[in-house]
Image: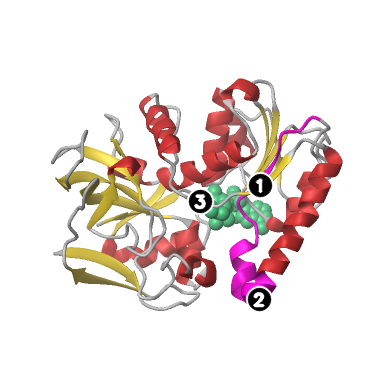
Amino acid sequence: MRHELICTEAATSPRLAVRGAPRPHPGAGEVMVKVQATSVNPIDVKRASGYGRRLLGLKGAARFPLVLGNDVAGVVESIGANVTGFARGQRVFGLLGTGRSGGAHASHVVVPQALLRHAPQGTGPDALAVLPYSFTTMWLSLRSIGITPANARGARVLIHGANGGLGRLAMQVLHHWGSQITAICAKGECQAALDLGAVAAVEYGPGCIESLPPDFDAVLNFANWDDDARLASHLGPRAMGQATTVHPLLANFDRLGWLGGAWASRRDRGRIRAIVASRAPKARYAWTIFKPDPQALEVLAEGVRARRLALPVGLAVPLDNAVAAYDHVLAGRPGRAVLLP
Ligand SMILES: NC(=O)c1ccc[n+]([C@@H]2O[C@H](COP(=O)([O-])OP(=O)(O)OC[C@H]3O[C@@H](n4cnc5c(N)ncnc54)[C@H](OP(=O)(O)O)[C@@H]3O)[C@@H](O)[C@H]2O)c1
């Protein structure tokens, strides 16, 4: 028997229940993992309210009851045909895509072997379970605007949302690569950003973006879509670009339907792209959309082994107290929220 956390219907205050279901079987190239820890990310809380129902519905990932969650840390229980490199009893961590077959908030899940990695020694399941989804999204943001270890040294990078999960991971990577990071921080969190290697940190508030220099090589917006235009106007003439994870793509389609959503998204993206192009003709402008990426997992596993990548865990609770984890994320309390099935 598998225990799974289901979100029973769309509501601002998540409607959650644990139910029993038959254990899944791994198919060819798949691994069945007994989950020891899985995380609640901001996207899970949004999806529990019905967010993304149109576009995620195309992937079969919006019909309630929903099993949410993407991150997995646990132990291999069984393997399917053609699986190489994994064996029963090994500690692993990895990722599920967002799709028809459901999420990771369950006691047992089937994961494609390409999206699993061996757990680095000395790092527990809760610490591992908070990383894959956030790291992958952050990594896709860097890649979308062409930041690599080869060009990151000395690059002036502005990060909005620097104290969040994506922001912290971006700082850990970019500091290691030698970038000059300016962090826009939550109230009282500037020192935490400086400790992670930022060369400058400003508290978010009226006039804070305007007070920044106008010549960043890259901007990462992990905090607030309403600031995207003002952030773009701080790119310098040789900028690589700006990536945002807080774009209105899914919300536009939810709110305005297929035609209206497509039109509004084109308009919204075009408006910021024009500012980016006016600042730096060769700069890219990207709306990041999470999708599993084996290369990102490889880099993540290496960074965890080297003790360069980590996020603080704020709360870890059993599946039947999942509501506390959802409340933790909804309230924006410090540290990631983990479920222990
Ligand atoms: N597009 C995608 O595929 C994708 C994938 C992953 C994540 N995301 C989104 O990317 C964002 C960052 O993810 P995360 O996991 O890093 O979230 P997180 O851990 O909640 O961090 C978000 C950070 O942004 C700040 N922030 C939030 N709203 C803000 C606002 N209106 N003005 C100024 N600062 C604000 C927060 O500060 P406070 O603590 O003060 O609120 C916090 O430091 C989230 O919105 C998430 O939903 C998108």
Question: Quick check: 8 left or right of 341?
Answer: right
| Circles 2 and 1: CB atoms closer than 8 Å | no
In the picture of the structure, the residue carrying the numbered disc 2 is 256
Please indicate, yes or no, whether residue 51 appears anywhere in the rendered image. Answer: no
| Residue 122 belongs to magenta span | no
Give the residues in magenta: 238-261
Residue 247 inside the magenta-drawn segment: yes
Q: Residue 270: percent from the left, percent from the top? A: 77, 55
Can you give x and y, in whole percent of width and height, for residue 58 in the image? 48, 68
Residue under pointer 3: 290
Ranked by sequence position, the earlier of labels 3 and 2 is: 2
Q: Quarter of the image for the C terminus: give it.
A: bottom left
Q: As rendered, which of 28 and 184 lies closer to the eye?
A: 28
Residue at image position (67%, 67%) is 262
Helix, strand or loop at disc 1? strand
| Res 307 label | none
Q: Amino acid at mark 3?
A: Phe
Q: Secondary structure at mark 2?
A: helix
